[in-house]
Amino acid sequence: MKIIGARQAWHDALHENRSSALAVAAEQAALGKKSGGGDVKVMVMLENHDGVEVAKVYDIRTEGVTETRSGRRLTESRCAHMLVAGLVLQAIDSLPKSIRHFGNFMYSPIATGNDLSIAHGLVWLGSGLEALTDRKKQRAYWMAMAALQSHKMLVAGAEGMGPGAVCMFVEDRTGEKMNPQNWARDWCDIWNALCTHIDKLDKQALKPVAAVVERLREREDNEEEIAA
């Protein structure tokens, strides 16, 4: 996996089998640990456990050992990808469950409706919009989902949703007219409050992944300096 940023790392880590990636990550100390005069030598094998391929890491003993384990030897690049993916997944798993679902909705290539549902609830409940009238609150509830979709578009490099698109989104779910001409008067402050809250949640979700990315980049820089 090429490390570009935390959002990309979250996405790319979930292209691999989760169990396999975590199995490799559990052995990260062995893969990078120094022992005596050189690196610890390991073998990563892909083994079938009840129909699921799971990566296993074994120390290589060069004397007096005949290898009898069945399994497919991983390529160096695949092993490296799985190790990085495992580190990223461990960082994701350190998050509170609701924040993890929020991040999965934003960045996972296998995001589910459950991720969206929990992310929507997280945004709405923390938005501080309880004082709205019932009529506005009903629309603001669906604006929260529109704001989630808009933020996801923005972080993917596309344009976010404008007032017209938001009004259409809400009308489609409530069946009631929402005039974009009244946006500045009635809805702009609500939209800004939702977007600000989503931005805070996004930063919270990415924080542990960003820390992993920073460590990996530092490691790459050090290796390049040594190679030079």
Image (cartoon, helix red, strand yellow):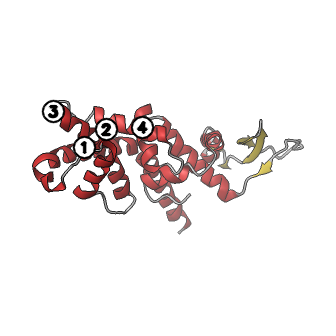
Residue 140: percent from left, percent from top: 24, 40
Q: Residue at x 18, y 52 (%)?
A: 179
Disc 2 + disc 3, Cβ < 8 Å: no
Question: Which tag, 2 or 4, sits closer to the chain's start?
Answer: 4
Q: Amino acid at mark 1?
A: Leu
Q: Can residue 200 be spotted in the picture?
A: no
Side of 189 relative to 138 (left or right) = left
Tell me how far mark 3 sits from mark 4, CA to CA. 23 Å
The residue at the point 53 percent across, 60 percent down is 2
Q: Secondary structure at mark 1?
A: helix
Q: Secondary structure at mark 4?
A: helix
* Mark with earlier residue (1, 2): 2
Give the number of the disc on residue 194: 1
Q: Is 7 on the left or on the right of 75, as rendered?
A: left
Q: Nearer the observer, disc 1 or disc 4?
A: 4
Measure the alpha-carbon separation of dots 2 and 4: 10 Å
Which residue extends farthest left?
A: 185
Residue with the mark numbered 2: 123
Q: Which residue is mark 4?
A: 117
Where residue 135 sits: x, y (%)? 19, 36
Choose between 134 and 70: the one closer to the eye: 134
